[in-house]
Amino acid sequence: MKCLVVLLSLLCALVQAAPLKVGLHDSAPWAYRNAQGEITGLDYEIVKTILQREGIEAEFELYSYSRLLKLFSEKKLDMASPVGVPYPGAFYSQPYFTVLDVVVTKNSSPLSINSLKDLEGKTIVAYQQASEVLGPDFAATVKKAHYLEEADRVQQFELLMNDRVQLMIGDAKVLAYYATKHYGAKSIKSHQILPSVDYPAAFWNAELQAKFNSGLLHLTESGEFDQIHAKPRL
């Protein structure tokens, strides 16, 4: 019996010592692998800094957004970021992951986009599920356009740059990063007609949620949060 108690104690200790499994959305500059194959990016640095400050060891992996949500919903991840979907039993951090979707044209385009109505009749490519994410007004508007949703960022840019579409819709940070890296900083022009959305991280443990929120508050008040955002990513 004593041996069984000792064995169970050791197993519990091993479970407690296991690194946290953290999943992030694979999308530069938020989280991506650099030329050396190392994970880097805004969200990676924010999450890693917070967890280290709280003394939490973690293993990070990057996933497509649909894969990230699937693994988290199956409880194969202890933490996922960002998560904009409510899961029963999950705990959510304070929102900190700000996404501003913009409408992008080639810099040489004469088009002026000042409202949703200006999208009508245009040829448009957006990310997968954009018509659901961006709300009913957007969904109704793009029904009056030649609208396509494409998951592949390379394909999105090729459609725009080869004049197969007039407009591209996506996260301002992501599109600016990709355009600068592959086409030059002045290759595209952004039109801001959509509101920004703040997303949280999600956990299956309330104590972890509390520790993350505490670390996030410290990161924000210390100015380190803004410093991470200000770092050049190319």
Image (tube, rainbow, N blue to C red):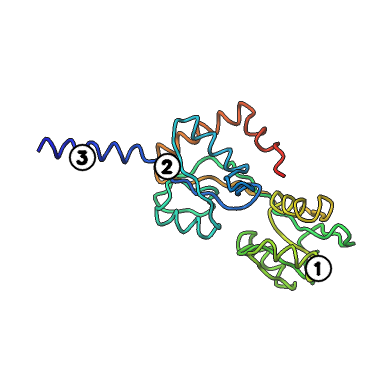
- Identified by mark 3, the residue type is Leu
The residue where tag 3 is placed is: 8
Q: Could you tell me if the residues under marks 3 and 2 are in contact, i.e. CB atoms within 8 Å?
A: no
State the quadrant of the N terminus: top left
Q: Residues within 10 Å of mark 2 (few under 14, many from 20)?
A: some
Alpha carbon separation for disc pair 2 and 1: 44 Å
Rendered view: 213 above or below 194: above
Depth order, front residue of 86/108: 108
- Identified by mark 2, the residue type is Leu
The residue where tag 2 is placed is: 20
For the point 70% across and 43% down, the residue is 233
Alpha carbon separation for disc pair 3 and 1: 63 Å
Farthest residue, direction top = 222
Alpha carbon separation for disc pair 3 and 2: 21 Å
Question: N-terminal of the two: label 2 or label 1?
Answer: 2
- As helix, strand or loop, the secondary structure at mark 2 comes to strand
Q: Is residue 169 left or right of residue 163?
A: left
- As helix, strand or loop, the secondary structure at mark 3 comes to helix
Residue 200's quadrant in the figure? Answer: top right
For the point 60% across and 27% down, the residue is 221
State the quadrant of the C terminus: top right
Q: Is residue 178 left or right of residue 212?
A: right
The residue where tag 1 is placed is: 162
Residue 97's quadrant in the figure? Answer: top right
Q: Could you tell me if the residues under marks 3 and 1 are in contact, i.e. CB atoms within 8 Å?
A: no
